[in-house]
Amino acid sequence: MVRYIGQKVLIALATVFVLATATFFLMKLIPGDPFANDKVSVAVQEKQREYYGLDRPVAVQYVTYMKNLLHGDLGYSMKKTGRTVVDIIREAFPVSAKLGLFSLLISEAVGILFGILCAQFRGKWPDYLLMVVAILGIALPSMVLGPIVRYLLGVKLQILPVSGWGSFKQMLMPAFVLGLGTIAGNTRSMRASMLATTTQDYVKTAQAKGLPPVKVVLRHQLRNSLVPIIPNLGGQIAGVLMGSFVVESMFLIGGLGRYFVDSITNLDYPLIMGLTIFYGAFLVTMNLLVDILYGLIDPRIRMK
Amino acid sequence: MNKKNDSIKFAPDDFAPLPDSEKNGEQLARKKTSYWRDVWRNFRKNKAAMASLVLMALMVLLVLAGPEISGYNYYSNDYSAVNQLPGHAHWFGTDSLGRDLWTRVWAGGRVSLLIAILATLIPELIGMVVGGISGYFGGKVDMVIMRAIDVLMGIPSLIYMILLMIVLGSGNIATLVIAMSITGWMGSARSTRGLILQLKTREFVTASETLGASPAWVIARRLIPNTLGIRVVGITMSLPSAIFYEAFLSYIGLGVTPPTPSWGQLVKAAGEVFRYYPYQFLIPCACVALTMLCFNLIGDGLRDALDPRLRS
């Protein structure tokens, strides 16, 4: 187990290092000079470059940049004057995290429940109905789903607020738009893995002992069926994160996703760089945790 | 066939052995089926996949012919016909600049489908080469390549794609395809390598090697063609994600530049006026959703048709 975790941690660290390095050099490749300006004298431009350390060789700049990263310093935003990237993350990430976690918890639970129901009612109408939901989740990306849901629930039926952030009601719609993909994915994988267990000997034994079906499902089938869907969790966390770029802009939520999209529109390079590294490191950590969890639950994985 | 076989009458000599002269042991009773014909036969039984295939064929036809038959082009404004409902003059209506939406939807389809196809095939090719080399040579080469892929796969692809789009400059099809190719080849490399590890000890590979074939020839002509069958499923399944990435990048402002339409671009532009002109939004959305759905169903169907374990 230690070996397994060690290996995963090593790969994760290498990943973050490669991402940080790639980010630095890619940003260097962007054409253009932030200080090139006809209205400012050449001497002042030189001064500015010197101030920001841009007159030094790229290798020196890279070392400085990596050192700063290790200290958790991601630099200043270019467009939101006087604010550090870390400040912005500190302010906006909790909002995204709250929305993401809420969406993920609900959609995991609903997806698993749907999957169980599908498997129990295989070939009957609940199965077909829920598989339609699962198919819709695959076919409807958030930028398509968002405006439709917002119009139906917010404008037509007026049961939920169309935008904003703060109250529980305002969380429901964005969380649903973010989570439909996860619901769909879980319904499909859970259905398949539940069906795979129904023919297992231990399930037949449990049924033969006369256990009520509900207990057979919850005690015997559910636990084993959950194992194959754990690895999906990493991708689902990433999916929610990516979705948050769209959903937060759409529902006017001041989370990190919206800052990221704004920084791209404004070409706020330090903010793009900082958030890229932050998101990258965050997802790598999440994947690492999922891998470790998977190794803990299924000994076959870590023995490999 | 009849339910009851009691209509069949046997003569006493029906069970007598055939004389040797009438035996024809070499002849095959049934026509030989090739691998792909076999797959096709199984695929055809899957109704959802077949319907998807027909629908996609129709979609491709419309994408190719649609812009030509409308009599409009996708970029001309007409301020006397702004935001018109679908009707006789404009089959899908017009947008806020008076541009014909039928033309824009299908011209956008050209862009989106072209991006999807290229951004699926190019990474697949890169993956085949890298995976082929890694799997065939094994040992240190394999170790280095696989660890590199572990690391690269750890980087969230969309974040990396966004960064690449900023660096390469958004706005045209080529940069979108390049960004998606750089971020998307690892999965196919890993899968190809796995398949090649299984194949490389087989007799036909040994035979080629004994005859003096070079590694490149063995990989390209003996190994890769045998992985294609299984990779086809992966290829089909990655088309919808390419469609999604295009729409996503357009949404956050990194897609193709207007006035060039793409489905992602149309969805984004119309999402803002959805309340007032729902048709402008729903039509491109239907295209995106149907394409993503159909390719997923075709992929499912292919997987079932290719997987011998599922055959009864």
Image (tube, grey):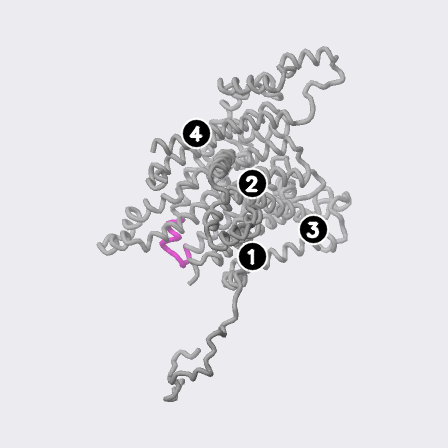
The magenta stretch spans which residues? A115-126
Amino acid type at mark 3:
Trp
Depth order, front residue of A304/A222: A304
Q: How far separated are the C-alphas under marks 4 and 2? A: 23 Å
| Extreme-left residue of the structure | A209
Quadrant in which the N terminus of chain B is drawn: bottom left
The label number, if any, that marks residue B52 in the structure image: 1
Disc 1 or disc 4, which is closer to the eye?
4
Toward the viewer: B127 or B236? Answer: B127
**Circle 3 chain:** B
Number of numbered labels in the structure image: 4
Q: Position of residue A56 (x, y in %)?
A: 63, 15
Residue located beneath label 3 in the image: B102
Give above or below for A172 relative to A23. below
Circle 2 packing at 10 Å, graded few (<14), some (14-19), many (20+), is many
- Examine the rendered structure and indicate whether residue A166 appears above or below residue B40: above
Q: Quick one: label 1, few (<14), some, or many (20+) residues within 10 Å?
A: many
Q: Chain of mark 2?
A: B
Residue of label 2 = B184
Badge 3: how crowded within 10 Å, few (<14), some, or many (20+)? many
Q: Chain of mark 4?
A: A
